[in-house]
Image (cartoon, grey):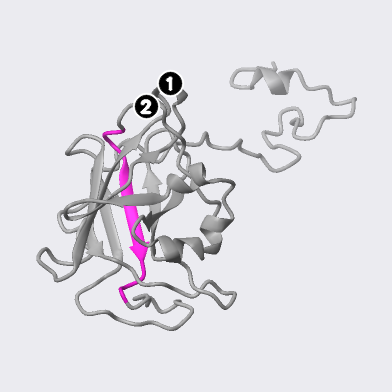
Amino acid sequence: MTTTAGISPQVLAAKDGEPRLPGEPRRGSGFLTEPFRLGLTPSATVGPYLAIGLTWADGPYAVADGTEGAIWLRGRVFDGHGDLVADAMIETWQADPDGGFDHPDAPAGERRFPAFRGFGRSHTVQPAGEYGVLTLKPGRVDDGAGGLQAPHVDVSVFARGLLDRVVTRIYFADEAAANAEDDVLAGLPDDRSRATLIASPTDDGYWLDIHLQGCPDKGMDETVFFAV
C-alpha cells in the first residue's frame, strides 16, 4: 500500500513524463534540480534608534571644552513636513586649523593637531531636533586641481526613513573670499542652493539647519546633499 503522508502537494502534483520548470522537484526525491534561491531581505532604515548605543558622552567634543579657539557647530534637523527630527544623529569630519587630517589615508599624509580628533558625533534628542559639536574651525585643504577648498566640515546625517546616511557640508559665512573660490560651491546651480550649506556666526560658533527635504509651505529648502 502506497502512502502519501508527509509528501508536499508540490511533489504530489509533479508530472514525471513532462519537462519540468527550473527548480521544480522530482517526484518523491525531496531535492530541487537547481540551487534554492532566497529573495532579497527587505531593506531597513538607519533610524530611529540611533541614540541607543551609537552616541556617547564625549561624542560631541572634537576638542575638549575650554580649548582655545573652540567653536560650537549647532543647528536643527527638519523633515519634509518642516517638523523637527528629534531622533537623528549627526557625524562630522574635518581638517584641523592647519588643513591637515588625523588619518593615515590623508592625501597630504597623516598630521596630528594637539588635542584635536577631527571627528564628532551628536544626537538630536535634547534639545529636541538640535545637534551640537564642539570643534576647531578647519583650515583650507587641497582641492586636487591646484587650488584650495574653502574651510568646511563634512557632515553625515542618519535619521528615520533613510535607507543610508546622507552627506552634506558646513561652510562658514565669514569666509566669503574662500567660499567664492571653492569648486564645490561654484558647481551648485544657484545662490539659493549654496545658502543651504553656509553656517551663520553665533556668539559661540556657527549655526546651520539641515533640511532632509524641502517644505515650501514653511519656506524651507532642501539641504544640498552629495553622492559619495
Q: Quadrant of the C terminus?
A: bottom right
Q: What's the residue at 21%, 38% (across, down)?
A: 125
Image location of residue 223, percent across then percent down = 45, 42
Left or right of residue 86: residue 195: right
Image location of residue 16, percent across then percent down = 85, 26
Badge 2 element: loop
Asked if residue 88 is among those painted magenta in the image, a careful observer would answer yes
Amino acid identity at mark 2 = Gly
34 or 80, nearer to the observer: 80
Image location of residue 37, percent across then percent down = 65, 39
* In contact (CB < 8 Å): disc 1 and disc 2: yes
Magenta-highlighted residues: 85-97
Quadrant in the picture for residue 13: top right
Asked if residue 115 is among those painted magenta in the image, a careful observer would answer no
99 or 53, nearer to the observer: 99
Q: What's the residue at 27%, 59% (across, down)?
A: 120
Left or right of residue 43: residue 118: left
Say which residue label 1 marks: 217
Mark 1, residues whose alpha carbon is within 10 Å: few (<14), some, or many (≥20)?
few
Numbered circle sitting on residue 82: 2
Badge 1 element: helix
Q: What's the residue at 43%, 21% (across, down)?
A: 217
Location of residue 111 with respect to 60 vertically, above or below: below
31 or 214, nearer to the observer: 214
